[in-house]
Image (cartoon, rainbow, N blue to C red):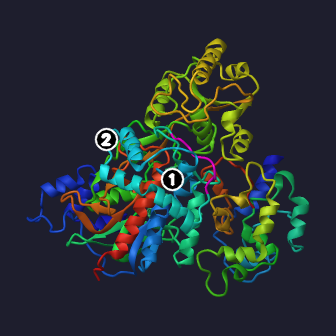
Amino acid sequence: MSDEKSNLSRRGFLGAGGAIMGGLALTQLPLDGAAPKGGTVVDSTMPRKWDETFDVVIVGSGFAGLAAAYEAKKAGASVVVLEKMPTAGGNSIINGGIVSAAGSPLQARMGIKDSPELMAKDMMVAGLGLNHPDLVKLISEKSTETVLWTISELGVKYLDNELVQEGGHTVKRSYKTYNSSGSAIVLPQLAKLKALGVEPRLETFVTRIYRDKDGRVKGLQIREGYEFPKADSGKLKTIRARKGVVLAHGGFGQDVAYRMIQDPKLTAKVESTNQPGATAEMWREASRIGCNIIQGDWIQVGPWASPDEKGFGLAPHFAQEAASMYGIWLDATTGKRFIDELANRKIRADAIMMLMNQGHKCIAFADAKAVSRLTPGVLDKLQKSGVVKAYNTLEAVADAYGMPRAAFLETVAKYNTNIRNSDPKNPKDDIKVSTRLPEGTVPLETAPFYVSRLLPKVHHCMGGIYTNTAAQAMDVSTDKPIEGLYAAGEATGGVHGAVRLGSCAVIDCLVMGRAAGSNAAKAKAWG
Amino acid sequence: MKAVALLLSLGMLLPLAAAPKRQPRVPATQCATCHGTEKVLPAGHVDIRKGKPACGECHTGDTTLRGKLPLVHRHALAGVSCEDCHGKGKPSAKAQPAACVRCHEMEALVAKTAQAKDHNPHADQHGYAANCNLCHHQHKPSKNYCITCHSFNWPVP
Ligand SMILES: Cc1cc2nc3c(=O)[nH]c(=O)nc-3n(C[C@H](O)[C@H](O)[C@H](O)COP(=O)(O)OP(=O)(O)OC[C@H]3O[C@@H](n4cnc5c(N)ncnc54)[C@H](O)[C@@H]3O)c2cc1C
């Protein structure tokens, strides 16, 4: 830290001291008379020497960073991927492996009608219109092409005959990786890159973005041999980016201090599904050099997590893909349903948190038919770890969770009547009204019955660096692209608006990561 | 009794004196070459000149050295030198996994831990197991990297 302090000019001090006022205050108070030509420049001190040079320098080794690296390398650029953790893949490699694609061949085979327009509409409805329509349009339009690219170019394996309908989607449109994990995408990404001679540099912490007086981003300062989370570990070095820097540093779900600045409700008590390195250093740094960080306080809390395992775990697969799609969620204190189980994540998480604040407990409930939809092996693991429990009768379920028996039996009977009385091709339920119910929904009556307890956990940062559709990071003072700076993935904002739909992050990361990489590789080199 | 046993084995692990001198090729049974005059074994400890297999004769149950003895000692007791892992010259920061798998064949490790509780640590789907250094440390206590996100609990040698 000390070396950074000594470098702080008056302007730098203001910028570093207040992320929120940073850009605005600086542009309103041009301390040296004239506004800099290239936009906001906060502390333009360039290093005296560069230790290394690459065409494209990428921060972060998740879906977005690796997609960028792949395209940049294929376009002939020299590329380096920097990752602060001892392992590659960030949140992407621990992700649930569900990827949306509108109008895909798998949908066609399963007789599901869908279109990019419908996907865009679903995203905008959940996003409360805070989504930037141009980004949403681009991602929906490129969704199928990109999933097919993961298959044909990366060799990613998805389940053959299964599509998922995440909450807030009006149709089943999400592919599921064979192992229910993002590792099924990240590992092939890493392998392909390795074959091209690019291996992420692990334990390499990016501490500073160098933006010069001419407004261009020219390189980065790193700590090589960094030992997370020791801020001053590792050796300081500089890396010059001749064509561009791609910020793909992901979200800050594990950064309690930063997350409480954005949304004070999200204290340390609220757990997170993210990897421990999902912290905000680069969010602060991007603000400091004049990126426009938008919608930072829209932080998604995942409603389907469980208090009986750490992090994301496996419970979300059960609670979403079995209990939410083909089963029901209950307030265990009353034995009644409390929410549309296919509503978006915010609606569901808020409802659970409200009930929890009243001392109630919530559970996800499914029967044997519903769990047969799960990826093979998942239920087994969930039962072994005790996160999901099985019961032979409905009464046993009620007793195990302290639910009033009569109320619970009535709830299940009512749901079953709804489903039984509706067209199997177009099943209907009086509570699941926000979306169309998945075809194949049947009454909940086949023992054994399965339950997981619900606990919302901090999951995704919807906000972030504002970019255009070419993945160029935009300057807070000029609304123009910052030369030499690209951003993609969860580090960026505007795609998901208020609420990200499940399975739309992967596709966002891949589409925009690829754009960032290929555009950076095409940029004019500065030196 | 338990406490005494623990203290005895910890006494061996956490010498209060300065870090030992690093010597590239030293038989593990000659403590003084690295540790100087510092007493590293508890008073009355049996002669360790017989090397690794003998340790397990006494160190069972509560006093097992599994997961407690820095791996560099286990390696040294098995006749593996610094150079065998780090190569000749001044050691680079970390020995590469390639050095580990020269002796510890990955497939054999996967098979060996196939029955581990919860999950096979050598067959994780994130590909982390390929980086031995994440869990197995030579010069400081090993740790289970998986518990960063999971509740799996294994003793890590
Ligand atoms: C458990 C879990 C399950 C999910 N499941 C799904 C799903 O099924 N479908 C879906 O669409 N979305 C899902 N999501 C969301 C999605 O996985 C993430 O939004 C996505 O992985 C983000 O990818 P990314 O490339 O932007 O960032 P990440 O994959 O998080 O990668 C960013 C990397 O940058 C590194 N980094 C950060 N700062 C620095 C720095 N200063 N220097 C160097 N490196 C740095 C981080 O350590 C990290 O490795 C899930 C998220 C989680 C946490």
What segment carries the magenta color?
A158-166
Q: Position of residue B119 (x, y in %)?
A: 73, 52
Q: Amino acid at mark 2?
A: Gly
Judge depth for marks 1 and 2 and give the one in front: 1
Residue at image location 50% in from the left, 22% down from the top: A430
- One can see residue A238 in this view: no
Q: Is residue A159 magenta?
A: yes
Q: Position of residue A28 (x, y in %)?
A: 13, 55
Q: Is residue A96 magenta?
A: no
- Marks 1/2 same chain: yes
Residue A376 lies, with reference to residue B142, above or below; the image says above
User: Seen in the image, is A98 located left or right of residue A393?
Assistant: left
* Nearer to me, A163 or A90: A163
* Label 1, label 2: how far apart the Cα atoms are: 25 Å
Letter of the chain that mark 2 sits on in the rendering = A
Classify 10 Å Cα crowding around label 2: few (below 14), some (14-19), many (20 and above): some
Q: Which residue is mark 2?
A: A129
Secondary element at image label 1: loop
* Nearer to me, A310 or A102: A102
Q: Quadrant of residue B126?
A: bottom right
Residue at image location 91% in from the left, 62% down from the top: B57
Pick whichever of labels 1 and 2 is earlier in the sequence.
Answer: 1
Q: Position of residue A88 (x, y in %)?
A: 55, 64
Secondary element at image label 2: loop
Residue at image location 52% in from the left, 54% down from the top: A91
Classify 10 Å Cα crowding around label 1: few (below 14), some (14-19), many (20 and above): many
Farthest left residue in view = A33
Q: Residue A104: give its label.
A: 1
Residue at image location 78% in from the left, 69% down from the top: B74
